[in-house]
Amino acid sequence: MIKEIPKRHPDLSVNQYNSIVKWCDNAIDQNQDFLYDISLFTKALADACTEYQIQRDSLNSLMRNTHVWHVKKTTRAVKNRMVSHAERYSRGQSIAQIAKENRYPPYLMARAMLEVLLNNQKISRKGLTEAMRNPVAKLGDPSVLAEKYFISESYPSPPVSRELLEQNPSISRLAREVLHVIEIDPMYGPTHDEARHRIGNDYEVLLVDVLKSMDVPFETEDELRKKGTSRTPDVLLSTPVAVQVPSGSDSWRIVCWIDSKALFGDARTHKDSVLSQAESYIHRFGPGLVLYWFGHAPQLDDAQGDITICGWNLPNNLLLPTGEVVVQPQSENGLEQKKEDKDSSSCISDKSGETGM
C-alpha cells in the first residue's frame, strides 16, 4: 500500500528531459555494466538522479521504458542465434556473460535459452514461466536437459546459498545459472514483474481513494467489466468534471474518465502505447485524463485537447457540473479524516432519523 499522497515535483524542462533521455540511450548504446548488475544499477541511478535532478522512481521507469524498446529491436537477432548461444553455454560460458556480449537482459537470455537447452524443446510459454519462477524444482535435475547439452553440467556454476545447497545437494548448473540471472538482473524477472503489478494496483487504489475523498461519483474498471463494457479506463466518472490545466490556471478542460499509469510518461511510450489506448476511450466516453504518477515528458501529444495529461497526482481542484469546486486533501491523513467525517455524518443522519420518528 502507498503510505502517503505523492508529492508534486516540478515539471521537467525540455533540455532537462532530453539530457536524461540521452543518459539512458548512452547507457544502452555503450552496454554499461550496470545494466547487468542490480547493485551497480542502483548506484548508477542514484548518481544520475542527483546529477539531473529527477526522482528515483521516475528515472527507474524511464530507463526501463527505454530499455524495453531496445529489447524489442534486438530480440529477433538474439533468438536467431540461440542455438549458437546454447552451444557456448554447453562449453562453459555463463548465461550472464552471453547476455552481456549480446546486449540482452540476463533474465530474458536465460528464458530464451531454455527453449533450446531443455529435453522437450516444444515447451509451452506457461512451462517456461514456471521454470523461470521456480528453477530449483523445475530445472534442478540435470535430466531436463537435451542429451547434447549434458556436457554443460561439467562446468563451474554460480554459487548458491548454503541452505539451498543443503536442501538440494545435486542441484544442476542450469538451475544455478537461472537463479543467478534472476538475482542480478536489474529490470527483468519475476520479482520486478510482481513489484510493477503491485505498484500499478496500489496507485489505482489511491486514485479511487482520492476521488472518494472528493465526493466525485464514478465507476471502476472492474465495475464496468461486470456490466460487459470492454476496453475500459481505470475510472469512468458518473458525470463529467472540469480540471484546471495547468493546475491553478484559469483554463479548464472537461474530463469524463481517468486512466492511472504508475510509470514515467516518456514521449515514445506515450505515443506508441498510451495514446492509442486513450483515443479508444475518447471514442467511447469523451475526453479524459491520463495520470502519470511518476511524472512525464514535456509537450506530450494530447489528442488535440481531448486528453488532459497530469503528473504526480490529480489536479488539486475539480469543477463539478453544479459549479462547485472540490479540493483534494493534501495528505493520506486528509483522506482518512474525510472517510471518518463521512462515516460520522452518516451515523448522525441515521440517529436524527430515529429521533424524528
Image (tube, rainbow, N blue to C red):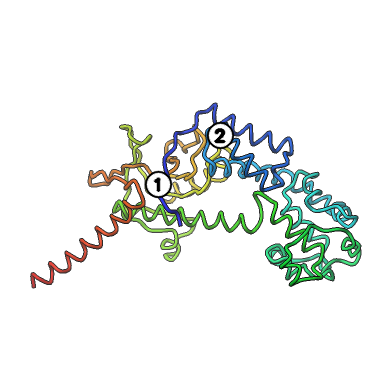
Q: Position of residue 278 (x, y in %)?
A: 48, 46
**What SS does tag 1 mark?**
loop
Q: In 3D space, how far apart are the residues under numbered discs 2 and 1 (Cα atoms)?
A: 40 Å
Task: Find residue 246 and report its image quarter.
Answer: top left
Number of other residues with Cα within 10 Å of mark 1, as a class: few under 14, some 14 to 19, many 20 or more: some
**What SS does tag 2 mark?**
helix
Name the residue type under label 2. Thr
Does residue 62 lie above or below 212 as drawn?
A: above
Q: Which mark is residue 268?
A: none
The residue nearer to you, when weighing 343 against 75, is: 343
Please tell me which of labels 2 and 1 falls first in the chain: 2
Name the residue type under label 1. Gly
Q: Look at mark 2 in the image and give the residue it sits on.
A: 50
Q: Position of residue 14 (x, y in %)?
A: 52, 28
Q: Look at mark 1 in the image and give the residue it sits on.
A: 286
- The residue at the point 71 percent across, 43 percent down is 73
The residue nearer to you, when weighing 9 against 50, is: 50
Q: Position of residue 135 (x, y in %)?
A: 73, 65
- The residue at the point 69 percent across, 44 percent down is 35
